Image: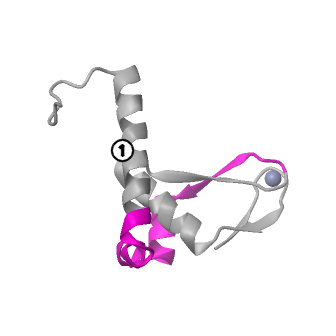
Amino acid sequence: MNLRCMYCQTMFAIGREEMIVALQTMDAENLSHYDAHCPKCRRANRVERKKLELANPNWQETLKEMGKEAAKAEKAEAVENKEDKAASSKKPAAKAKEK
Ligand SMILES: [Zn+2]
C-alpha cells in the first residue's frame, strides 16, 4: 500500500506483512488506526483500520498462511502489550485467567 507522509510529503509503501501485523495488533488492542512511520522524517502517519481492511479483506487467512508459529508469537506479544497498558491505565476488574 502506498502512502504519502502528511508531514514531508514523502511517498512510501507499507508491505503486505506489515499491514497484516498492523491489522492483527489493531484487532487485539481495539484500535481504529495504525501508525505508519515515515522512513524519512520518522513521524507517525495515521492509517485508518478500515483502509487496511479494505486492502486486505482476507487478512486473517493470510495471517494463518504466514505461519501459525509466527502468528502465535506476535499475537502473544500484542496481548502482552495490551495487558501492560490495561494494568497501567486501569485495574482489570476480574482477570479471567489467573495463574
Ligand atoms: Zn515524512
Q: Residue at x 36, y 69 (%)?
A: 68
The part of the chain drawn in magenta is: 41-70
Q: Is residue 65 above or below residue 47?
A: below
Q: Amino acid at mark 1?
A: Val
The residue carrying mark 1 is: 79
Instruction: Please state if 32 lies on the left or on the right of 15 as rendered.
Output: left
The quarter of the displayed image where residue 73 is located: bottom left
Instruction: Please state if 96 lies on the left or on the right of 11 as rendered.
Output: left
Instruction: Please state if 16 lies on the left or on the right of 40 as rendered.
Output: left
Quadrant into which the C terminus falls = top left
Q: Is residue 8 above or below residue 98?
A: below
Q: Residue at x 52, y 58 (%)?
A: 48
Quadrant into which the N terminus falls = bottom right
Q: Is residue 42 above or below residue 11?
A: above
Q: Is residue 33 above or below residue 3?
A: above
Look at the image and say whether residue 53 sits in the magenta stretch: yes
Whether residue 71 is visible, yes or no, is yes
Between 76 and 91, the one nearer to me in the picture: 76
Q: Could you tell me residue 60's position as x and y percent?
A: 36, 72
